[in-house]
Amino acid sequence: MRVSVCKAGDVPRDGMVAFDVGGRRVMIANVQGEYYAICDTCSHAEASLSEGYLHVGDCTVECPLHNAVFDLKTGEALEFPAEDPVATYPLTVEAGDIYIEIDGL
């Protein structure tokens, strides 16, 4: 299902913001004008990734709790202690609005 999440301007450049989308926490990251949508919950210890650290140079997010690192493009867990990936969601920006594709809503 395609869902409108926010305005593009709601996510600052080189920043990230979490949203509740149909009962799921989704993080939108803006990396130098490119937007990515991933699950906001770390697969290791259920911390909020949007409260972590955005690494613009390699397009990753670091969990604030145990420093696990995830690729924003693929959701892949890149650094221990996380081993499982987080979900990613296809994202489009149209007329200044951010939409994501999310199954099961």
Image (cartoon, grey):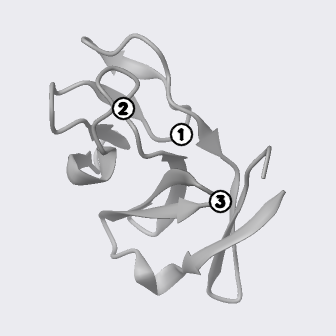
Per the rendering, the mark at residue 22 is 3
Mark 2: few/some/many CA within 10 Å (<14, 14-19, 20+): many
Secondary structure beneath label 2: loop
Would residue 46 be found to the left or right of residue 103 on screen? left
Check disc 2 and report the residue beneath it: 42
The amino acid on which the numbered mark 3 sits, given as a three-letter code, is: Gly
Camera-near label (2 vs 1) is: 2
Tag 1 residue: 73
Check if mark 3's residue and mark 1's residue have beta carbons within 8 Å: no
- The amino acid type, in three-letter code, at marker 1 is Lys
In the rendered structure, the answer to whether residue 19 lies left or right of residue 70 reads right
In the image, taking residue 78 as reference, residue 47 lies left or right, namely: left
Q: Secondary structure at mark 3?
A: loop
The residue shown at (41%, 24%) is: 43
Give percent across and percent down for residue 37: 54, 52
For label 1, the crowd category at 10 Å Cα-Cα, with few meaning under 14, some 14 to 19 and many 20 or more, is some
Amino acid type, mark 2? Cys
Picture mark count: 3
Point 47% across, 64% down: residue: 19
